[in-house]
Amino acid sequence: QQGVSRMSPSRPRRILIAADAPPPFATAAAHAATALGAEVIGGRAPDPSAITIGPPEFVASLPGVGEAIEAAPTDRTWELIAHTDAGGWAVTGSTPLAGARAMLQLVDWLQRAQVPERPVTMRTRRLRSLAMEFDDWSAGFTRMADGFDLGRHVADAVRIGVETLEVN
């Protein structure tokens, strides 16, 4: 696969979340901590040696991140993942949900030891909206299937960009 490093990427043991971050950032940080065996701490300043997640203004002071945020499109949703020189990661998005999707993407990369060679990844949405009208897994009878894990299902839905889920 071209453009993907097969070397073991840095996997910080700490996830630092902006102290006043909206709930989707905290939910994504908690999921990442479980998946990566890391601890989550809150803070008022980003840490270049940790996975730092929060609103764009929180992570913007990390080297290379502010410039990428400045260049981000203003007409559509975007997600940003940046590797820092100190071995950490900056994770954010134009919305809290986009930041959560970026964190899930980083978790996937780190678990598979396949991160892009470029230091900053900016992704934009192809579709303006991906709203689900009915999901038999989270709201229908299928949710009662043996072994069904609602938390994993919701994480996968966020990962692919779903913006709504039916709750029953």
Image: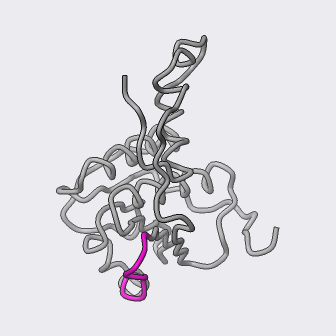
Considering only vertical position in the picture, is 72 above or below 35?
below
User: Which quadrant, please, contains the N terminus?
Assistant: bottom right
* Residue 150 within the magenta-colored segment of the rendering: no
User: Which quadrant, please, contains the C terminus?
Assistant: top left
Q: Where is residue 6 in the image (x, y as percent from the top left)?
A: 75, 63
Considering only vertical position in the picture, is 59 above or below 63?
above
* Residue sitting at x 66%, y 70%: 116
Q: Where is residue 20 in the image (x, y as percent from the top left)?
A: 17, 57
96 or 59, nearer to the observer: 96
90 or 139, nearer to the observer: 139
Q: Quadrant of residue 17?
A: bottom left
Considering only vertical position in the picture, is 121 above or below 97?
below
Q: Where is residue 15 in the image (x, y as percent from the top left)?
A: 38, 53
Q: Total marks drawn?
A: 0
In the drawing, does residue 117 fall left or right of residue 56? right
* Residue sitting at x 38%, y 66%: 92
Extreme front residue here? 133
Q: What stretch is highlighted in magenta?
A: 69-77
* Residue sitting at x 33%, y 67%: 47
User: How does the figure colour the protein chain or chains?
Assistant: one colour
Q: In which quarter of the image is residue 63?
A: bottom left
Q: Position of residue 40 (x, y in %)?
A: 33, 46
20 or 140, nearer to the observer: 140
32 or 161, nearer to the observer: 161
* Residue 76 within the magenta-colored segment of the rendering: yes
